[in-house]
Image: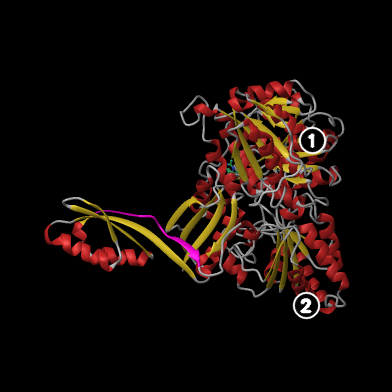
């Protein structure tokens, strides 16, 4: 049967079993929206700004491992979406973005709402396509879904000119795709894995460091099995949290710029490091030459060869998909006669426990001012550690990562690579669509939340009972912290003036608002939000201590062991 | 170190911008870049000359391989290879310079492919260093215009870059 391009777009989404599309209509996608209207298999979520559409689709994927889908119109629709696309790209999140484009005959003529979408998005997508002929449309969309999800995942954009949505052709959706130029490696090299096993068994001070790759590839269970088998300490990056149960003794907490003493010291002083689905980035290992001063053997498992030996030289590179590589690693370990040396391992754990004894995340909650850490800790307790937690970017993000202990993968949703303020609320929306019964909290700051505050309207329309935990310090807190520590207390433009009354603001959108300014009210308020207002969106505005800083801290350019600790430690 | 990287890439619109965009986004250096379709019109072959440490060149080849449209990448300079560049030079050729210019072109095995009363266009191929040497051998004040293609290269013997 002959279908129009617009019909084909919707049929492809149906074939891909897409349930939700986040988007915003406009001139160039009108025919596609018309087809959306005529069916009810694919539901469209109308956001209030295209950036939020992409963030929501992104979190939809992060929290479920499905591919997120969004749709935007040409020109400003696309440019608004760019921040969302770049955010997903930096964290390797599988997305398919369908964008409208002016008719092919107008391309290059500075037509109304024209922009060079493929050019603008090229550096922040895994791949993109401009479909010039309706005959290529179905296969291109199939390729987009295939590319987004395989190999190192990432966003893929398909730009569809308006005339292509009107042209007709025979529709058939390809079942499989093979591309001579794209063949991601899945299985790791058995010989390399053998070398890794040998190194791990010979280690005296071993350490396991894992990142977002473990979450993205759904390898948490296998990782947990491996870590328990070996009895080694494990740490995680901001993107890797939940890959191993945070409440387990073998977990040393997050590492990096705001990592724990035990994680950073063990990372620095280990003699064999097993890195899995992580990329040694600057926020994680600090200064690479300081890191390399200590001689250690590094085994690195990653699906992307270009992540290996990029910032730190690796001794045993293993390219492959993490679950497949871990299977083989576990198999070879089970087959090996040797076991890790218990005496050395016990001595190593003794050292680690000394570092752990510093209790670096300690804080004092007095009677007057609410400490932000206390709010996160209480949220953790009240939700039994079982909520999906999204965050924005800043101090609150770090406190969320430090004080909410994630035992399960895909529960901690934040922008690690790009560090995009504004993601928190749309992320919470995406999580809730992917997990319709889930408890969802958004830990944010009074500055970040205002970057996508309009989504309170979307949340009302779709009755999303998100619990917003606003750690309101009246400052761009993370900026203020750097200014205090590195710029002589000159707080240039970091004071957030003229704040709205968040309670009234929430109420005006039809939500519940609360202001909490006493430590004693923190727990009752959170309890009330999760019980009495279980089915409502609750905006909890916590007026917190303005001087609180995130510790420990490794200053930019410093080594991992050169942490600044809270004063009384 | 100077490396010559050869790439087979799907002959799609925008393929060149993906490669050049990668070099600028990651601050890799490009000395020259040439591109044209191969005998199989669905594929283009690019030759990129870049200068960088071994670590940088390793990243360049890995990042190129990561581009979805790239089918194959080889670093030609890792083994025996041949490189060639084409140059066209327009020179003033009058009076006694006319004879001298022809003589030098002959020495460099250049060919005169356009002649007017006062100018020659000389065509030269060879490694980049040979083209440089020619420009040094003639009187620079006589050079009116030069154009070079950038390097293209191929492996010697059994080294074949094909799908
Ligand atoms: C879109 C964007 N702009 C600027 C920044 C730089 N930045 C990082 S943290 C921060 C302050 C965030 O303030 P707030 O949301 O109140 O959180 P707090 O640090 O106070 O917890 C800023 C401006 C950013 N990460 N993202």
Identify the residue shown where x is 81% and y is 55%: A220
Quadrant holding the C terminus of chain A: bottom right
Few, some or many residues within 10 Å of mark 2 (<14, 14–19, 20+): some
In percent of width and height, residue B110 lies at 29, 62
Mark 1 — residue? A17
Distance Cα–Cα, label 1 vs label 2: 48 Å
Identify the residue shown where x is 53% and y is 52%: B39
Instruction: Using the image, tell me which numbered label, if any, was put on residue A552.
Output: none
Identify the residue shown where x is 72% and y is 24%: A36
In percent of width and height, residue A479 lies at 57, 47
Q: Is residue A367 visible?
A: no
In percent of width and height, residue A68 lies at 72, 38
Q: Is residue A383 above or below residue A215?
A: above
Residue nearest the viewer, comparing B80 with A480: B80
Few, some or many residues within 10 Å of mark 1 (<14, 14–19, 20+): few
Residue nearest the viewer, comparing B163 with A406: B163
Q: Is residue A262 above or below residue A179?
A: below
Magenta residues, start to end: B144-155
Is residue A286 covered in magenta? no
Please identify the dominant SS of the magenta region. strand
Q: Secondary structure at mark 2?
A: helix
Q: Quadrant of residue A355?
A: bottom right
Looking at the image, the residue that sits furthest to the left is B95
Residue nearest the viewer, comparing A434 with A506: A434
Mark with earlier residue (1, 2): 1
Q: Quadrant of ligand 1?
A: top right
Mark 2 — residue? A202
Quadrant holding the N terminus of chain A: top right
Q: Nearer the viewer, mark 1 or mark 2?
A: 1
């Amino acid at each position: 049967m002959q279908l129009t391009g617009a019909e084909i777009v919707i049929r492809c989404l149906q074939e891909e079993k897409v349930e939700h599309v986040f988007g915003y209509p406009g001139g160039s996608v009108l025919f596609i929206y018309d087809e959306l209207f005529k069916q009810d298999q694919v539901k469209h979520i109308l956001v209030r700004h295209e950036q939020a559409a992409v963030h929501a689709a992104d979190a939809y994927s992060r929290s479920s491992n499905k591919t997120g889908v969004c749709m935007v119109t040409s020109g400003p629709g696309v440019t608004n979406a760019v921040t969302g696309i770049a955010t997903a790209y930096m964290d390797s999140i599988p997305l398919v973005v369908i964008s409208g484009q002016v008719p092919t005959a107008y391309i290059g003529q500075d037509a109304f709402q024209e922009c060079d979408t493929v050019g603008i998005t090229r550096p922040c997508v895994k791949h993109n396509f401009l479909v010039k002929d309706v005959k290529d449309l179905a296969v291109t969309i199939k390729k987009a879904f295939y590319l987004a999800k395989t190999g190192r995942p990432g966003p893929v954009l398909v730009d569809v000119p308006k005339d292509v949505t009107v042209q007709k052709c025979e529709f058939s959706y390809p079942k499989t795709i093979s591309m001579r130029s794209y063949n991601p490696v899945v299985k790791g090299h058995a010989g390399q894995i053998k070398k890794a096993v040998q190194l791990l068994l010979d280690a005296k001070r071993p350490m396991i460091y894992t990142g977002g790759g473990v979450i993205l590839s759904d390898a948490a269970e296998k990782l947990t099995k491996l870590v328990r088998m070996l009895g080694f300490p494990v740490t995680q990056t901001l993107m890797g949290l939940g890959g191993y149960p945070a409440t387990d003794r073998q977990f040393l907490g997050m590492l990096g710029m705001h990592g724990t003493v035990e994680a950073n010291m063990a990372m620095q002083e280990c003699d064999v490091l097993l890195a899995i689905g992580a990329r040694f980035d600057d926020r994680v290992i600090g200064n690479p030459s300081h890191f390399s001063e200590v001689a250690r053997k590094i085994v690195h498992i990653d699906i992307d060869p270009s992540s290996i030996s990029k910032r730190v030289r690796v001794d045993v590179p293993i390219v492959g998909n993490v679950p497949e590589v871990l299977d083989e690693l576990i198999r070879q370990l089970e087959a090996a006669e040797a076991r890790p040396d218990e005496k050395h391992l016990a001595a190593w754990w003794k050292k680690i426990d000394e570092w752990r004894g510093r209790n670096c995340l300690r804080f004092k909650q007095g009677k007057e001012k609410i400490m932000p850490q206390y709010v996160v800790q209480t949220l953790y307790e009240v939700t039994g550690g079982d909520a999906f937690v999204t965050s924005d970017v800043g101090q609150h993000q770090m406190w969320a990562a430090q004080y909410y202990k994630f035992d399960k993968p895909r529960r901690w949703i934040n922008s690690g690579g790009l560090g995009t303020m504004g993601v928190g609320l749309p992320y919470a929306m995406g999580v809730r669509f992917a997990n319709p019964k889930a408890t969802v909290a958004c830990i944010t700051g009074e500055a970040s939340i205002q970057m996508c505050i309009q989504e309170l309207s979307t949340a009302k329309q779709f009755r999303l009972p998100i619990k917003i935990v606003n750690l309101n310090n009246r400052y761009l807190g993370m900026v203020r912290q750097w200014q205090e520590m590195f710029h002589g207390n000159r707080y240039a433009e970091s004071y957030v003036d003229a704040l709205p009354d968040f309670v009234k603001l929430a109420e005006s959108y039809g939500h519940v608002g609360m202001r909490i300014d006493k430590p004693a009210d923190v727990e009752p308020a959170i309890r009330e939000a999760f019980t009495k207002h279980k089915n409502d969106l609750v905006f909890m505005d916590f007026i917190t201590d303005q001087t609180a800083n995130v510790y420990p801290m490794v200053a930019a350019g410093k080594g991992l062991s050169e942490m600044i600790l809270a004063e009384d430690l | 170190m100077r490396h010559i990287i050869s790439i087979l890439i799907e002959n799609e619109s925008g393929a060149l911008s993906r490669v050049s965009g990668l070099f600028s986004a990651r601050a890799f250096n490009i000395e020259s870049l040439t591109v044209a379709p191969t005998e199989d019109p669905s594929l283009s072959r690019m030759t990129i000359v870049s200068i960088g440490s071994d670590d940088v060149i390793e990243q360049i080849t890995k990042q190129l391989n990561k581009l979805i449209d790239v089918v194959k990448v080889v670093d030609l300079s890792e083994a025996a290879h041949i490189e060639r560049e084409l140059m066209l030079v327009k020179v003033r050729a009058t009076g006694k310079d006319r004879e001298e210019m022809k003589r030098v072109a002959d020495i460099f095995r250049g060919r005169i492919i356009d002649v007017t009363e006062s100018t020659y266009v000389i065509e030269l191929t060879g490694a980049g260093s040979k083209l440089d040497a020619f420009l040094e051998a003639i009187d620079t004040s006589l050079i009116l215009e030069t154009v070079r293609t950038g390097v293209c290269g191929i492996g010697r013997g059994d080294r074949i870059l094909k799908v």
